[in-house]
Image: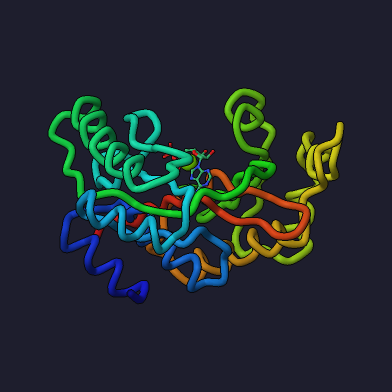
Amino acid sequence: MSFAATLALARAEGRTLLNEVEAKDLLREAGVSVTNTTLARSAAEAVTQAEAAGYPVVLKVVSADISHKSDAGGVKLNLKDAGDVRAAYDAIVASCTKHVPGARITGVAVQHMAPAGTEVIVGMTTDPQFGPVMMFGLGGIMVEILKDVSFRLVPLTERDAGQMISEIKGKPVLDGVRGQPPSDIAALRRTILQVSQFVEAHPEVRELDLNPIFAYPDGAIAVDARIVISEA
Ligand code: ADP
Ligand code: MG
């Protein structure tokens, strides 16, 4: 679906939160590397899609009422066969219904389980005064507790994107420390620029999070994507 069609559909449904499948489809179209992710509306559909994606797979809740999926028990990793997928589907629906009573659950997102990498975050928030602002940081506690992040106003130059990466205190982690492999900095710089261009082209995007992106010695891939659009 095009950006315009996705926007129209979300607005018709009274949503400002695009689901993970919609967000990844738009970002893939914009050149960003994301895991192939499909929407399953039943356990049987999830099994068929898991077989197409290749085991092990990950299942995640798709609900306009749930934006932090793990908090609601809505993420199941490393599912190895059809039995795992069926059980995970039921467990996700049960847990999310319990955590968020009345949540509208559309189904689950099915995707291949990506190999572990160094976790980084690329995000965008809209500042009331300055407009879209890009954010970059290392994933997990580095962002949540240490607030080790860098910011730049959109639009970004290639130089800005490079500086965002080199500015963070945790940069040595990306260079490779203590036996950890180095991360593909050029791929991360490209991702930051592509996201900047995407939000510049689509002012209806109010918030965007790729959290996390797995960075590898060769390449990087977003395993989660979240997009919030403005109200109609
Ligand atoms: P949320 O942020 O809404 O809780 P995520 O999609 O980020 O949900 O999933 C939670 C965690 O599960 C991620 O931080 C990541 O570590 C892991 N994860 C998610 N999707 C994948 C995937 N396709 N491959 C490997 N790990 C994944
Ligand atoms: Mg996430």
Give the residue displayed 55% in from the left and 53% down from the top. Answer: 222
**Picture layout, residue 38 above or below residue 147:** below
Give the residue displayed 62% in from the left and 37% down from the top. Answer: 139
Q: Nearer the viewer, residue 180 or 132?
A: 180
Give the residue displayed 64% in from the left and 41% down from the top. Answer: 119
Residue 24 lies, in percent from the top left, at: 44, 61
Count the marks. Answer: 0
**Picture layout, residue 90 above or below residue 218:** above
Residue 150 lies, in percent from the top left, at: 69, 43
Q: Quadrant of residue 95?
A: top left
Q: Quadrant of residue 23?
A: bottom left
Relative to 223, 163 lies left or right: right
Residue 194 lies, in percent from the top left, at: 60, 66
Q: How is the image coloured?
A: rainbow
Q: Residue placed farthest to the top in the image?
A: 145
Q: Nearer the viewer, residue 145 or 89?
A: 89
Q: Nearer the viewer, residue 117 or 100?
A: 117
Relative to 55, 18 lies left or right: left
Give the residue displayed 69% in from the left and 64% down from the top. Answer: 190
Whether residue 126 appears in this view of the structure is no
Whether residue 17 appears in this view of the structure is yes
